[in-house]
Image (spheres, rainbow, N blue to C red):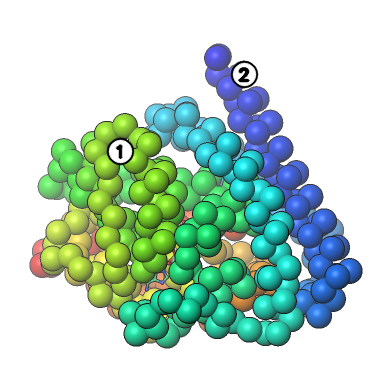
């Protein structure tokens, strides 16, 4: 395929995903209002001009995604990468799960978790149904639906937002004097491994490690990642607040869409741990929701996200000073940029600190 044709195919795919995401949300919200009105959240009005700004911001994200693939930061095939067949077969399950989500929402029941888990194995803040999802993060059923649910939530842009960690990561690795041929990169809270999949497309020789508290999500990650050629990423069950890795053992750490689900102290502790396991000169790249300070124009969208989904730490997160937290942890050379609904921060462990 020539480049203009590939670009058109990418744009068409994204438009299709966006329309499907919007249609799903519209129809499911109408249905909920009809059959489970108690589950409806009171949302704030989104002014029409903001919808235009959101559209522009999303188009800018996709344009950048295309440009960076053309510049060979990562393979163009990543732009089309998704388990399509799996998603088509699982889509009916997303609908079948909705009544249980609505019931939980009506009852304000956010601790409805599988009976067979050991609560002592997890921090208290984790033992909740984030987004009211069935089983929280603690079952295979939840893990099987997660990627599709996130795609719908972000109107098909989730991976394009995850790929924003790649440019600062490559820059950070290139300017690290150690210049490892097979850099060891840890993805904290890797979930089902979508970020590792993007990183593999950019760094075929890297030694990738993914850590998450959920064994069910890691099992799903293993299923997806074992399809890829090359070395299998190492997947480790553990807590981002107490990483089971030696000091200075990683050249880079990434962490995507975790911080907004943590209380402030845990957020700081995850950054402190990233600093500890990075080698001197190593780079940390974070991606998470935009915040009130960098994207005040989208504050109604942030407010509605918090009201509609069970996200107990989001309000605190959107006002949190992540640069200050990075400095507290010891990071230097900080930088941050926003892309659509995602903000990306990077920082370096000073070269003279062990
Ligand atoms: C919103 S998901 C993001 C997953 C993935 N990074 C992505 O981009 O889709 C949050 C993930 O963080 C994990 N998680 C939450 N608290 C954690 C902690 N303290 N340590 C490790 N993982 C954690 C959850 O199990 C879940 O997989």
Q: Which residue is mark 1?
A: 203
Cα gap from disc 1 to disc 2, whole angstroms: 26 Å
In the image, taking residue 192 as reference, residue 87 lies left or right, namely: right
Query: Residue 150: horizontal and vertical position, in percent?
Result: 58, 55
Q: Position of residue 294 (x, y in %)?
A: 56, 66
Q: Residue furthest right?
A: 34
Left or right side of 122 for 349: left
Q: Residue at x 34, y 41 (%)?
A: 226
Residue found at the far top of this picture: 2
Question: From this viewpoint, which residue is outermost toward the front?
Answer: 116
Q: Decide: marks 1, 2 in contact (CB < 8 A)?
A: no
Q: Residue at x 47, y 50 (%)?
A: 162
Tell which of 244 and 340 is nearer to you.
Answer: 244
Choose between 85 and 339: the one closer to the eye: 85
Residue 164 visible at all: no
61 up-or-down from 43: above or below:
above
Q: Secondary structure at mark 1?
A: loop
Residue 254: % across, % down:
34, 57
Dot 1, crowdedness within 10 Å: few (<14), some or many (≥20)? many
Residue 137 in sight in this render:
yes
Residue shown at the point (53%, 45%) measured from the top left: 160
Can you identify the residue that label 2 sits on? 5
Tell me which corner region of the image, top left, top right, bottom left or bottom right, holds residue 327: bottom left
Quarter of the N terminus within the rendering = top right
């Amino acid at each position: 395929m020539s480049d203009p044709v590939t670009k058109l195919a990418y744009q068409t795919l994204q438009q299709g995903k966006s329309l499907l995401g919007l249609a799903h949300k519209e129809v499911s919200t109408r249905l909920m209002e009809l059959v489970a009105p108690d589950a409806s959240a009171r949302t704030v009005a989104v002014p029409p001009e903001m919808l235009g700004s959101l559209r522009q911001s999303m188009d800018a994200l996709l344009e950048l995604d295309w440009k960076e693939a053309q510049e060979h930061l990562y393979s163009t095939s990543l732009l089309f990468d998704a388990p399509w067949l799996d998603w088509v077969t699982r889509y009916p399950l997303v609908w079948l799960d909705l009544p249980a989500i609505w019931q939980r929402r009506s009852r304000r029941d956010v601790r409805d978790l599988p009976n067979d888990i050991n609560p002592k194995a997890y921090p208290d803040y984790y033992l909740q149904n984030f987004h009211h999802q069935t089983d929280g993060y603690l079952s295979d059923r939840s893990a099987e639906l997660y990627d599709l649910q996130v795609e719908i939530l972000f109107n098909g842009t989730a991976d394009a937002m995850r790929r924003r960690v790649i440019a600062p990561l490559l820059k950070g690795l290139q300017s690290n004097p150690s210049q490892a041929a097979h850099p060891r990169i840890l993805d904290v809270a890797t979930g089902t491994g979508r970020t590792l999949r993007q990183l593999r497309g950019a760094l075929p020789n890297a030694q990738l490690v993914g850590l998450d508290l959920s064994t069910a999500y890691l099992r799903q990650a293993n299923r997806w990642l074992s399809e890829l050629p090359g070395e299998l990423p190492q997947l480790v069950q553990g807590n981002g607040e107490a990483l089971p890795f030696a000091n200075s053992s990683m050249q880079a750490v990434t962490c995507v869409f975790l911080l907004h689900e943590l209380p402030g102290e845990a957020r700081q502790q995850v950054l402190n741990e990233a600093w500890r396991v990075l080698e001197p000169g190593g780079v940390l790249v974070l991606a998470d929701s935009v915040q009130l300070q960098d994207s005040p124009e989208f504050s109604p969208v942030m407010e509605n996200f918090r009201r509609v989904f069970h996200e107990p730490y989001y309000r605190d997160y959107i006002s949190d000073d992540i640069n200050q937290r990075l400095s507290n942890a010891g990071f230097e050379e900080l930088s941050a940029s926003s892309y659509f609904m995602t903000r990306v921060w990077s920082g370096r462990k000073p070269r003279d600190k062990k």
